[in-house]
Amino acid sequence: MRQTTSGPRAPVAINKYLLPKEVQVASVRQHPAVLIMPSAQALGGLIVVGLLYATVVHGVLGVILWIAWGVLLLRLLWKIGNWTVDYFVLTTERLMLTTGLLTRKVNMMPLAKVTEMSFQRSFAGRLFGYGEFIVESAGPDQALRHVRFIPYPEQLYLLICGMIFPSSADDAEDTGSHLPAIPD
């Protein structure tokens, strides 16, 4: 996970959305596990099409099968492209989720408006090291409610809670304990 301040080290995809005095505390991409399903589908499709083409199917139907597999491959490449530019960002002022390769979408929630925050981990999440944040605020429309495939969820959760409840984080520093370090 990247823990930097805003400036030249912050990814351009994030830096241009920060306010002049806003400081980036942490930024992460979604966990690479988000790419497992599209990768498995592309690989499985390749195996099936290859076996069918080698044994049974030829001609026009074979070409159609290869085109179908090409669609799966393009979908995988699209998911990889999106993964490289999508970030979950914690700043001194807000939580942000930037998504989209061609159509950019920036969802944010001011830290002051967060009323509840939790995270959950499925069995696969525990196995691969990712989790999901559920963020709630007052009001019916929430731009940032579920943030899926977050790496280092426990550490990020504690970091965000420390920023939402600074007096509790200060008490922890007074007693000698501190928030866990998040790996780079």
Image (cartoon, rainbow, N blue to C red):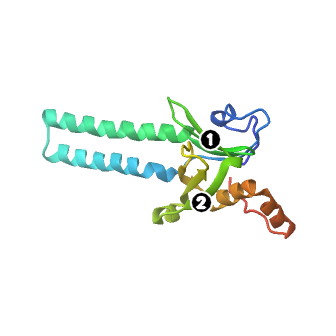
Image point (63%, 62%), residue name: 154
Side (left or right) of 66 relative to 131 = left
Question: Can residue 152 be spotted in the picture?
Answer: no
Instruction: Classify 10 Å Cα crowding around label 2: few (below 14), some (14-19), many (20 and above).
Output: some
Given the current orientation, which residue lies at the most extreme front position? 139
Image disc number at residue 118: 2
Mark 1 secondary-structure assignment: strand
Q: Position of residue 42 (x, y in %)?
A: 34, 45
Disc on the earlier residue, 2 or 1:
1
Image point (14%, 38%), residue name: 58
Q: Position of residue 180 (x, y in %)?
A: 72, 63
Image disc number at residue 83: none
Image disc number at residue 108: 1
Question: Can residue 165 be spotted in the picture?
Answer: yes
Kind of residue at disc 2: Ser
Q: Write down the quadrant of residue 64 in the picture.
A: top left
Q: Write down the quadrant of residue 57 in the picture.
A: top left
Q: Estimate the spatial distance between the alpha carbons at disc 2 and disc 1, rounded to whole Å.
A: 17 Å
Mark 2 secondary-structure assignment: strand
Q: Position of residue 183 (x, y in %)?
A: 68, 56
Kind of residue at disc 1: Met
| Badge 2 vs badge 1, beta-carbon distance below 8 Å | no
Q: Exactly how many numbered labels are in the figure?
A: 2
Q: Position of residue 54 (x, y in %)?
A: 18, 45
Side (left or right) of 102 relative to 110 = left
State the residue in front, 180 or 66: 180
Image point (78%, 63%), residue name: 168
